[in-house]
Amino acid sequence: MRQPEIVRLLSLLLAVLLVAPVARTAGDLALSAAFLVEFLSGGAWRPLSSLTATPHREPMSVPGVAVDRWIGPAIVHVPLVLVHGYSPEGKDDSRVRQAAALLARAGFDVAVPTIPGLTRGRLRPDDIAPVVATLAARAAPTVMISVSVGAGPALLAAAQPEVRDRVRVVLSLGGYASAAELLRFFLTGDFRWGSIQGHVDHDPAIVRQFVEANADLLDAPAREILADPVRAASVLDHPPARLASVLDQLSPERVAPQIHARLVLVHGTHDPAVPYTESLRLAAARPERTSVILVGVLAHVEASRGASWLSGMREVGALLLGVYSLSRPS
């Protein structure tokens, strides 16, 4: 991100602060603005870090799950569970640690479980259990943030009867609704929802690596077909029974009406990893108490290099209010 763009962004956030409610809410809104600047700049600008003390990281006791807890010096902390996306190191990934620390600086008591399937690029239904266990160990009500494909286990956990009343709000950043459509996009580059359709070119080597990581769900001929984008669509229209079952179990849209929490779905309109149509699909499955924030200032889960902050003023304001809403009662 270039420095002039950061200056314009800071000016925008200041303008939003001036017209926003003050007094009791001003502190939370200011922290949200500082968080957003540091997040969107990838740490190039660090207003939140300069205003707050370094948070403490410690292991959190959750049976059968590797969980870190991040907590800052704030008097009041909002319980939060952060569900990472694809990350070979899980909770120990440097990007995950940076996000958790930033959230802790903003006043959240952050729990970060490692999701085993997301460390190997092979998400499975049993990857929901670590999120459920972490939610059960948190004080209620809890906020949850999911990143990328981490939306699968996060949203599916939020629908589980034993913990769904413990979750107040879920913010999904670049998440998905249909595992089948996500797989179609990843293998073929095609996406669609209603009258919206598009295509993104993917690296064939990465596609083949993904197919090989999930070889247990496919026989050899199917693996060869799925590694070829031209032929993959035919298999995805009528997937093998085992693959179809797993995809159904991993689709948040299937259980969306059972989620009691408020949903805030943030998605970049030029997301190259998960198409923004997936957030539209999820919102259609559970429209009540669901907000969709589509922005051009984000690529996948990071700031878009080509974004113009001046043209995205309303988008950044919406992002600010989305982050701010996590600290406020529903």
Image (cartoon, grey):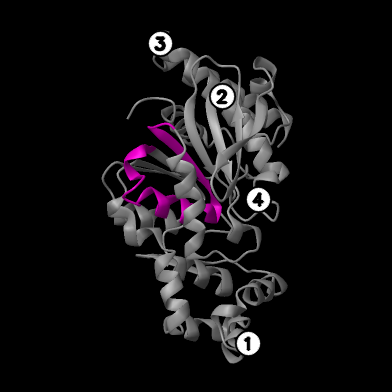
Closer to the chain start, of discs 2 and 4, is: 4
Q: Which quarter of the figure has residue 209? A: bottom right
Residue reaching furthest to the top: 23
Tag 1 secondary structure = helix
Whole-percent x and y of residue 155? Answer: 42, 51
Helix, strand or loop under label 2: loop
Give the mark nearest the N terminus, 4 or 1.
4
Q: Secondary structure at mark 3?
A: helix
Q: Amino acid at mark 2?
A: Ala
Tag 2: Cα neighbours inside 10 Å, few (<14), some, or many (≥20)?
Answer: many
The residue that appears at 58% across and 34% down in the rendered structure is 309
Q: Which residue is mark 3?
A: 24
Please provide the residue range marked out in magenta. Answer: 139-168
Mark 1 vs 3, N-terminal side: 3
Q: Which image quadrant: the N terminus? A: top right
Is 258 covered by the magenta stretch?
A: no
Residue 208, horizontal then vertical, whole percent: 67, 76
The residues tagged by marks 2 and 4 sit, at their Cα atoms, a distance apart of 22 Å
Which quadrant: the C terminus? top left
Q: Which residue, given by chain and number where applicable, does mark 4 sit on?
A: 90
Mark earlier in primary sequence (2, 1):
2
**Residue 238 visible in the displayed image:** yes
Along the polypeptide, which appears first: circle 2 or circle 3? 3
Q: Please give the residue where the numbered disc 1 appears in the rendered image.
A: 224
